[in-house]
Amino acid sequence: MLVELRRGSVVESRHHVHVAVVDASGALVARAGEPDLITYWRSAAKPFQALPLVLDGAADRFALTHTDLALACASHSSEPGQVALVRDFLAKIDCTERDLLCGPHRPLSEVVARDYETRGVRLTAIHSNCSGKHAGMLALARHHGWPVEHYTRPDHPVQERCLAEVSRWTDLPVSHIGVAIDGCGVPCFALPLRNMAWAYARMRNVEGGRPNGEPNQGSAFRVPQSAFRIVESMLRHPELIAGAGRPCTEIMRAHPGRVIVKVGAEGVYSALLLPDGLGIALKVEDGHRVAAELAIAAVLEQLGLRPQPAALGPQSVANSRGQLVGELRVTGGVA
Amino acid sequence: MLVELRRGSVVESRHHVHVAVVDASGALVARAGEPDLITYWRSAAKPFQALPLVLDGAADRFALTHTDLALACASHSSEPGQVALVRDFLAKIDCTERDLLCGPHRPLSEVVARDYETRGVRLTAIHSNCSGKHAGMLALARHHGWPVEHYTRPDHPVQERCLAEVSRWTDLPVSHIGVAIDGCGVPCFALPLRNMAWAYARMRNVEGGRPNGEPNQGSAFRVPQSAFRIVESMLRHPELIAGAGRPCTEIMRAHPGRVIVKVGAEGVYSALLLPDGLGIALKVEDGHRVAAELAIAAVLEQLGLRPQPAALGPQSVANSRGQLVGELRVTGGVA
């Protein structure tokens, strides 16, 4: 599977896409490129970093809402409303913005970024697209009585707990998961696309708050019932998972209750297609953001989730004079 | 040859690099990936689009200086001094900025772009990195008595003349060269990397204003003596070919008289290594700009042009907290 930039009649640039589509049993049902490619899951791992909140009782203890849990899973756009909700989340756990150790960055939404520039808004940790995830990590620390300082360190119990959860859902021993530092300062995880897809597929095995999954062959894993709160929080709040105009939000809005889509940095997407119980993980080998957006929409469309937002179809490329000189589009698919 | 982004101990993203290194006889002396990959030459074709100025007598007619000719070959940074020189060039041919049909764009130099933003400079056609090339095209039209209107159209005699020159130096019939529209509105050319590299290598066959090249086997091509003015203009003015801090300029400054380096959009570079008479053309398959910068420096270093500017060595990647979390570096080389 490729995303190609065509100019005139010639392909000018190519982006290679690797995809794994896996069912809840762990079977690879479709693929493109190398489904066992090892890469970093980046922000597409967030739902599994949020799961300890419900599994360990922190969500109940602090009366976390679907809104709070959705933000813990989100790579939000730093929209004013999203930032305000993260502040509310922090207040519930007796923390403030000053406890956040994520760094500020230009908002992932260009519209929001320009608005803040125009208004001279000073960007701080709370504007990080990961501030909801960090709030969740602080909540986990508060719940267990662990120190809230240095919660980003790989040897902090919060991070060890998140890694253990990632290990469980991906069916990989901790020793088989590569750990490095993510854009926001917490550990991120390197593992095969196939295992990322499997973890998403497994999230499907909860319905109406009741797990219906069977243990997987050779694995004692059962989908915990409380995991449904994480799935439901994302399904209820597509507008928080990314933001207006961004692919995760727009694909989920177009198909309410049928799909979870989660972006990761450097050309990564993961998704759960609920009607079919399929997990999807993809990586654009060179990390190209727009190519990854078109690729996830194309894979979901091929798997039957139609229509996809028009903005995620072939993209015209204009030059400095406004002439249409090329097109970026997906060729091939999963098989 | 790859440019890899490593995070921790795992390669997160990969950029494939295709390279052709060719001598003046057209022999492929080194390669990486697919040296016959067809892609667009983009702005790395500019010296050959400037050659008709000297070959047809326009440079003499209008008393064009090395400065003017260097700007005709340049993808400049829109620096105030560069823009002023393009205005002078236009005045010599009785044209003004209003005759330019290139569109404005954010300057290729981030320093210049931020300076203009801070000072509220309105960007116009003269700020296009291609404004020198367009001035050259207007000069050619003036010289031949062709209309200066619509000089960007593929069927305008200026563009037919440029294509003929590209065909001659690359040893490809016009019918074998793909033509599409470049970022600035004029035709751009799709052809194999090997032929791009050969054209650059052939430019070496002029010394002290005298061609020393022999006709190539199976080709009646002789390097015209006047072509030396184009080579010399670039060698004398590295600061105009790109701009302060940009790779073409910095590599040429580090090795005066020994190399010509010319960037093209979408991950393209071409170069002429004068001591060895080698032409180089490379393309990063996915168009990644920084990967192409590191790749051209690595290839030139491997071919003996040492040292390369430190800024073009392995690049540290920092996250939003300022932690060094990864590195972008070249692996492999030409062989």
Image: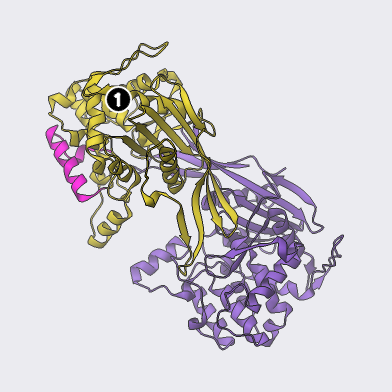
Chain colours: A purple, B yellow
Q: Is residue A274 left or right of residue B323?
A: right
Q: Is residue B160 left or right of residue A178?
A: left
Disc 1 marks a residue whose amino acid type is His
Residue A129 inside the magenta-drawn segment: no
Q: Position of residue A329 (x, y in %)?
A: 55, 42
Q: Residue at x 42, y 10 (%)?
A: B218
Image mark 1: chain: B
Q: Is residue B308 left or right of residue B231?
A: right
- The kind of secondary structure element at disc 1 is loop
User: Residue A188 lies in what quarter of the image?
Assistant: bottom right
Is A98 above or below relative to A82?
below
**Which residue is nearer to you in this view: B222 or B55?**
B222
Task: Give the position of the N terminus of chain A as an image quadrant.
Answer: top right
Q: Position of residue B131 (x, y in %)?
A: 25, 40
Most prominent secondary structure in the magenta stretch? helix
**Residue linked to disc 1:** B156
Q: Which residues are magenta?
A: B78-101
